[in-house]
Image (spheres, rainbow, N blue to C red):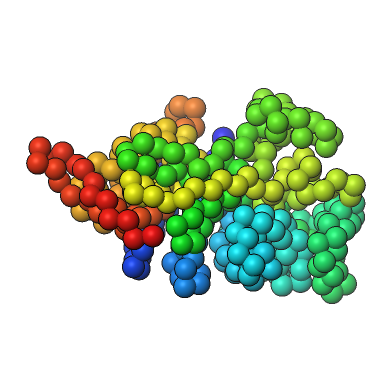
Amino acid sequence: MGAYLSQPITDKESSDGEDAKFKYGTTAMQGWRTNMEDAHATVLGLDEDTAFFGVYDGHGGKEVAIYVSRHLHEVFKSNDAYKKGDIPQALIDSFLAMDANMIHISGRDELQELVGKGGEREGGGVNDLSSKMRQAILARARANGDADVEGDGRPWEGPQAGCTCVVAVVRGSTLVVANAGDSRAVLCRRGTAVEMSRDHKPTDEDERARIQKAGGFVQEGRVNGSLALSRAIGDLEYKQSKTLPADEQIVTAYPEIKKEIIAPGDEFMVIACDGIWDVLTSQQCVDFVRKRLKHDVPLSKICEELADECMAPDTKGSGIGCDNMSAVIVLLKGTAFVNGSDGKPTFRERAHF
């Protein structure tokens, strides 16, 4: 469940942004947790026709989430599949590349620097990893054509920490969501929540089967009795097999992909960590946001109200509502909000895609 403060930190880091196609708002709040381990990224102009939005929920430390927030979109844009227009494959390649990149000299040093800035934290960290684990990750990196991962001769260290990763990419009229972990992306379509990702839990039948086949086990809903999600970037201790591909490891960064064509009636997306989704259903969240749009509330303010709504009044319960809270709301400008003749919210559709 993690360690909690005696009083929550409710200060929020929020932002708003806009271009011709999108308007977004974000917020991040530490809440009851002793450390803030979430990160996110919003890149409207990844190229002239592509926008990128991601939420990364860290565990065991903040360093992997921050590292991914800094680099995933850059790796994605430079990927060969991206240059060929294959967004799903570019996302898969980029998710998997994060683990390999973190054993580069630069990746290692950046992670160590992030740990140094973190002070006390909930376990995890950057520790010496086993020779077996190092060889396994190097072997997979070489198999992917990455030769520059040997390091500089210093003792090799890697992150015990990890993070979820949910990314929404819009190119033209196509929305592609990639997800590894239990953060979530939801599309509001004419007021109805359309889940664009699946929460990856060790108790899911297919996830449990992979975990057990790779030599792990599920105990009390956790991988090897410890990790509460079954897919993540980082968490290298669960990715030690030299004989298994990345998508068959006990824990994998391999994302599930979902595509949709954006059409009239598609209003906005909510991308958030499980601190939100543990409290609200996808439909409840969509209703919460939609209600506030009619008052022209800034999107970052709606995100802040969403975080406040989900925060527990105390830590006496099950832990629900006591997590870090991060949310990104993306308004699709092809649908404009107006008030109907009865005073109730309605939408005027102006598709521009």
- Residue 293 lies, with reference to residue 115, above or below; the image says above
Image point 79% across, 42% down: which residue?
248
Residue 338, image x and y in percent? 18, 49
In the image shown, does 94 or 202 lie closer to the viewer? 94
Residue 242, image x and y in percent? 89, 49
In the rendered image, the quadrant that contains the N terminus is top right
Q: Quadrant of residue 143?
A: bottom right
Image position of 202 (left or right of 273): right
Residue 225, image x and y in percent? 71, 31
- Residue 353 lies, with reference to residue 152, above or below; the image says above
Image point 37% across, 43% down: which residue?
188
Residue 97, image x and y in percent? 71, 60
- Say if residue 71 shows up in the picture: no
Image point 85% across, 63% down: which residue?
142
- Residue 51 lies, with reference to residue 301, above or below; the image says below
- Say if residue 255 shows up in the picture: yes
In the image shown, does 316 or 144 lie closer to the viewer? 144
Image point 39% across, 50% down: which residue?
263
In the image shown, does 294 or 15 lie closer to the viewer? 294
In the rendered image, the quadrant that contains the C terminus is bottom left
Image position of 175 (left or right of 220): left
